Image: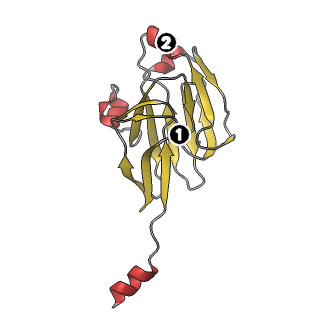
Amino acid sequence: MFKSLKKMFKSEPKTMSVKSPAEGKTIPMSEVKDPTFAQELLGPGIAVCPRKGRIVSPIDGTVTMVFDTKHAVCVQSDEGVEIIVHAGLDTVQLKGKHYTAKKKAGDKVKAGDVLLELDLDAITKAGYDVTTPVVITNLGGCKISECFTNKEVKEGEEVMRLEEK
């Protein structure tokens, strides 16, 4: 009897959708050609191999940091989930060349708002991999319930789903 009562009054866990920051193909973090990301040392996530030179916010929230080198942006949701979108591997070495930040720390953003513009061809010609990890550095009391890897996505399409623990 108590089980059925608990079931009646138990609310469904809240979920949060993490959107793709770029148009391209999603890959599991384990396939990223950088051990820091592949081993999820910064946190779990997914990566996108972008086809266009813009990076959009994967969630609604506040930009907490734009790296001086403009290769990465941190966004925090109102629920406390923190995400780093890292546009390219070892691209910190470019010192901002080929990148333009469109937002700054403190800016409120909606999923799909442009965070960065980048010249994919120039970055690739300079010898860098443009694979873009989307790292969850703080799950904010959530867990990843689904990752949609090895699929072609448009920017703003769901790539991860988080669920309240």
Expressed as whole percent of the image width and height from the top left, the position of residue 124 reads 45, 13
Q: Of circles 1 and 2, which is in front? A: 1
Taking the spot 41% from the left edge, 38% from the top edge, the residue there is 42
- Residue 29 marker: none
Expressed as whole percent of the image width and height from the top left, the position of residue 70 reads 58, 24
Q: Is residue 19 above or below residue 122?
A: below
Taking the spot 61% from the left edge, 36% from the top edge, the residue there is 65
Give the quadrant of residue 26.
top left
Q: Is residue 98 above or below residue 11?
A: above
- Any part of residue 126 in sight: no
Give the quadrant of residue 27.
top left
Badge 1 element: loop
User: Which quadrant: the N terminus?
Assistant: bottom left
Residue that label 1 marks: 156
Distance (Cα) linking label 1 and label 2: 22 Å
The answer to whether residue 113 is left or right of residue 30 is right
Expressed as whole percent of the image width and height from the top left, the position of residue 71 reads 54, 25
- Any part of residue 48 in sight: yes
Residue placed farthest to the top in the image? 125
Give the quadrant of residue 106.
top right
Query: Could you tell me the amino acid type at mark 1?
Result: Gly
Query: Could you tell me the amino acid type at mark 2?
Result: Asp
User: Which quadrant: the C terminus?
Assistant: bottom left
Residue that label 2 marks: 121
Taking the spot 52% from the left edge, 50% from the top edge, the residue there is 81
Residue placed farthest to the bottom in the image? 1
Taking the spot 67% from the left edge, 33% from the top edge, the residue there is 104
Q: Is residue 71 above or below residue 1?
A: above
Looking at marks 1 and 2 on the same chain, the residue that comes earlier in the sequence is marked by 2
Q: Badge 1: few (under 14), some or many (20 or more) residues near its Cα, within 10 Å?
A: some
